[in-house]
Amino acid sequence: MSEEQGYEAIDCNFHDVLEALCTRRDICTLNHSQGPNRVRSDRGRIVDLYTTRGAEFLQMDNGREIRLDRIVLLNDHPPEDYSGKEKS
């Protein structure tokens, strides 16, 4: 298997939020990048979080696989809002 190009690890707190959504089977809205100037929105439940080819992914209940570092909004908030770090 080849490695995913340019994968950037996500913040651990954001990963914890995704895991909690999966565990609780909460419905969420994920906006994720699909290339330059292309953002897709998916609404549903996260059914799995996993690592493969050197990158982390989630799978939605509609079958869509989303690379975690391509998420730009989760329930209308950017990943940075879940980092637990104070904004300056």
Image (spheres, rainbow, N blue to C red):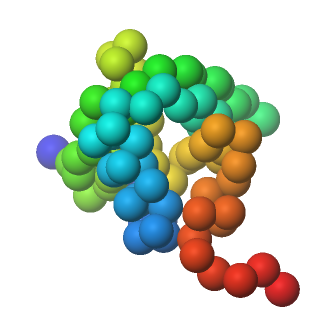
Position of 86 with respect to 42 (left or right) is right
Give residue 65's position: percent from left, percent from top: 37, 29
Position of 5 with respect to 79 (left or right) is left
Q: Residue furthest top?
A: 62
Q: Is residue 22 visible?
A: yes
Residue in the picture at 28% in, 41% down: 23
Asked where in the image residue 85 lies, by quadrant, the reply is: bottom right
16 vs 32, nearest the viewer? 16
Residue in the picture at 53% in, 31% down: 28
Residue in the picture at 41% in, 59% down: 15
Q: Residue furthest right?
A: 88
Give residue 77's position: percent from left, percent from top: 71, 49
62 vs 22, nearest the viewer? 22
Asked where in the image residue 61 lies, by quadrant, the reply is: top left
Position of 38 with respect to 54 (left or right) is right
Quadrant where the C terminus sits is: bottom right
Residue in the picture at 78% in, 35% down: 37
Asked where in the image residue 73 lies, by quadrant, the reply is: top right
Give residue 51's position: percent from left, percent from top: 23, 51
Quadrant where the N terminus sits is: top left
Q: Is residue 67 above or below residue 65?
A: below
Position of 5 with respect to 78 (left or right) is left
